[in-house]
Amino acid sequence: MFAGRASAAGAAVGPMVAGKGGKFSVEELYGFTKKPKVKKGNSGKTDQGDDGKKGAKEREESALASQILVAARRLMERRRLESFLQVCGVAMEQSHMTYRMQVSIACNMGGGGGGGAVSEHPLKERRSAVAVNTNSALVCQSKVRSESSGRHTLLGHAHMKEALGRHGNMKYRNLGKSGLRVSCLGLGTWVTFGSQISDEMAESVMTTAYDSGVNLFDTAEVYASGRAETTLGNILKKKGWRRSSYVVTTKIYWGGQAETERGLSRKHIIEGLRGSLSRLQLDYVDIVFANRSDINAPMEEVVRAMTFVIDQGLAMYWGTSRWSAVEIMEAYSVARQFNLVPPVCEQAEYHYFQREKVELQLPELYHKIGVGAMTWSPLACGLLTGKYNEGIPESSRAAMKGHAWLKEQLCSDEGKKQLSKIKELHLLAEKLNCTPAQLAIAWCLRSEGVSSVLLGVSNTEQLLENLGSLGVLTQLTPPLITEMDALLSNKPRNAKKEGRT
């Protein structure tokens, strides 16, 4: 049937692909490893004449035509599918030479299961279904799009995929370039759980956070000597929330007094994480962090141990905390070299007076290797709220045992300069009709590559105030950010970019 077309196709394709200088032959491109075998006689010459050679050539060209026909049909099916999706208002974008649908199956745009061949007439068969399910398609579009300053942007086109959740104001972002969705505000347990606040208050704070859409809870084996993990685990068990509805992270490094109970050796990573899981009363944590780098542990040992706990189902992902950009890049390189699991996130301190790492180094890592940022201490241990403007309150962190460094910092010349700048920023917060804490947290959220900001609160009132920062985020216009940078006078400078300009 296609013999005539095959001759034309073979004549057109053959010289172009297999001619002089061509890298591949037609046989290689279309899977022909050998030409049809021809029987030979005793003399070594072919028994077939010119008719036999012609028949073999026609069979070869016919097989080639069949391959071309299959490819053409697939192309036609794809174009029909794209037309159908355009009717539904759904985009299909090209990425890494493959196509992926940026729409949930929940959109219910037609019957039948996935994985089957596309119908030859999908538009004719499904236009009626689209007409009936117009409302469903509109709901689907609203799920695919996110709102930012009144603009609708496709999730796939946004730098940090962000969407409103079922809790209204809470927003969710991907953790780095992984598929894990975390609330842009998380709840930390440093200083508070198992130490500064009662278990009853901790439960009240966690309940309010969860009901407000917070799905990220962070702790560490060293917090309150393990009591923070115990308190967090007791609350989770008592509440009985679905394990799939929240994310728990913990950090490993300082586990005990013995030499083998701290650091990032394979022994302590595995045993330390099992101890954390026992205190948390969980089968696994979603992310395990290396709670600082360890010069005594080879990087390959660290990455292999993290890969092991993930393979064993003790954790889903692993990340770093207070690592330098060079160390994170080394871990990534080791993971790629030995086919291991690379880190997905770095926990870093970030606030008005600690900017360089999150604003200069981590964005570069995000774009190159997909490492996101989970930041902590957005209020600089309460400094940015103004609680230390008139001295050090007795109930503050600076007055607590073990926080003498904070008291010294406040009393230093640099600390006094910072307090002066904070007062000016408080005036700016008044103009925006928000609290200084809300402005400071929103300022952290506006940074590129920040997946989530961890909050540390002592009561539900502080938590609700901090959650209000989501409403301030939309007010942080470029002119306002420029004004804040002028007040702070500490915006990091990218020497590489300045050198190129």
Image: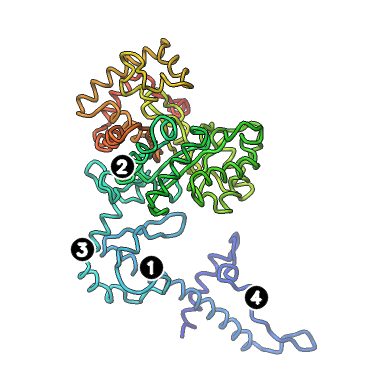
Earlier-in-chain disc, 2 versus 1 = 1
Residue farthest along the top direction in this orientation: 413
Q: Which labelled disc corresponds to residue 78?
A: 1
Occupied quadrant, residue 330: top right
Give whichever of discs 2 and 4 has the lower sequence position: 4
Where does residue 291 sit, x and y in percent of width and height?
53, 35
- The type of residue carrying mark 2 is Thr
- The mark that comes first in sequence, 3 or 4, is 4
Q: Residue at x 41, y 39 (%)?
A: 449
Measure the C-alpha gap from mark 3 to mark 4. Answer: 56 Å
| Residue under the image location 39 percent in, 37 percent down | 199
Q: Badge 2 local density, few (<14 within 10 Å), some, or many (20+)?
A: some
For discs 3 and 4, the disc positioned in front in the rendered view: 3
Task: Left or right? Give the position of 292 relative to 427.
Answer: right
Tag 4: amino acid:
Lys
What residue is rendered at 32% in x and 28% in y? 440
Q: CA distance from mark 2 to mark 4?
A: 70 Å
> Nearer the observer, disc 1 or disc 3?
3
Residue 319 drawn above or below residue 295: below
Which residue matches tag 3? 135
Coloration of the structure image: rainbow
Picture layout, residue 39 above or below residue 142: below
* Residue annotated with mark 4: 34
Nearer to the camera, 454 or 480: 454
Disc 2/disc 1 C-alpha distance (Å): 48 Å
Q: Are marks 2 and 1 in contact (CB under 8 Å)?
A: no
